[in-house]
Image: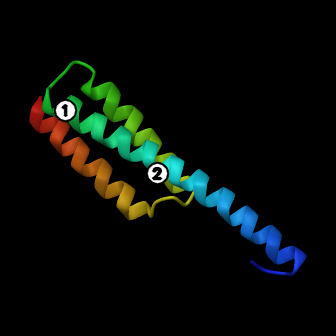
Amino acid sequence: MPNIKSAIKRVKVTQTKTLQNTIKKTALRTSIKKCKEAIATSSDTASDSYKATTKALDKAVAKNLLHKNTAARKKSRLAKALNAAK
């Protein structure tokens, strides 16, 4: 544990931000899994699930949780699976 006051604060802030990033990434992964499930079962909500997932991916890129190419790749693969299921 650091002794300097500013370093102590940095540790606390880093822990808080790490926790928030973990929560957001977990929610993103869950959204992707739900979208894949909806596409696999070819349910009526697959396109709605895809839209929600792409929105979540775009937000993750804006918040620097994901690299833009990673999000683009994930969106592309989901779109390809959605189009193949139709």
Q: What residue appears at the point 12 percent right and 28 percent down from the top-left corner?
A: 86
Q: What residue appears at the point 22 percent right and 50 percent down from the top-left corner?
A: 77
Counting residues from the N terminus, which is met first, the one under dot 2 or under dot 1? 2
Q: Which of 73 and 24 is in front in this view?
A: 24
Q: Which of 1 and 23 is in front in this view?
A: 1
Quadrant of residue 28 within the rendered picture: top left
Q: Which mark is residue 25?
A: 2
Quadrant of residue 64 within the rendered picture: bottom right
Above or below, 4 relative to 84: below
Cβ–Cβ below 8 Å for labels 2 and 1? no
Above or below, 41 relative to 82: above
Q: Where is residue 81 in the image (x, y as percent from the top left)?
A: 16, 41
Q: What residue appears at the point 60 percent right and 51 percent down from the top-left corner?
A: 20
Q: Residues within 10 Å of mark 1 (few under 14, many from 20)?
A: many
Above or below, 9 relative to 81: below
Does the image show residue 64? yes
The nearer-to-camera label among 2 and 1 is 2
Assign a secondary structure to mark 1. helix
Q: What residue appears at the point 44 percent right and 64 percent down from the top-left corner?
A: 67
Q: What residue type is labelled 2?
A: Lys
Q: Position of residue 19 (x, y in %)?
A: 59, 54
Report how far apart the C-alphas of labels 2 and 1 lie in the structure: 21 Å
Q: Residue 86 carries which label?
A: none
Q: What residue type is labelled 1?
A: Ile
- Judge left or right: residue 58 versus residue 72: right
Q: Where is residue 44 in the image (x, y as percent from the top left)?
A: 22, 18
Does the image show residue 57? no
Q: Residue at the front extreme?
A: 1
Q: Residue at the top extreme?
A: 44
- Judge left or right: residue 33 versus residue 40: right
Identify the residue under disc 1: 39
Q: Quadrant of the N terminus?
A: bottom right
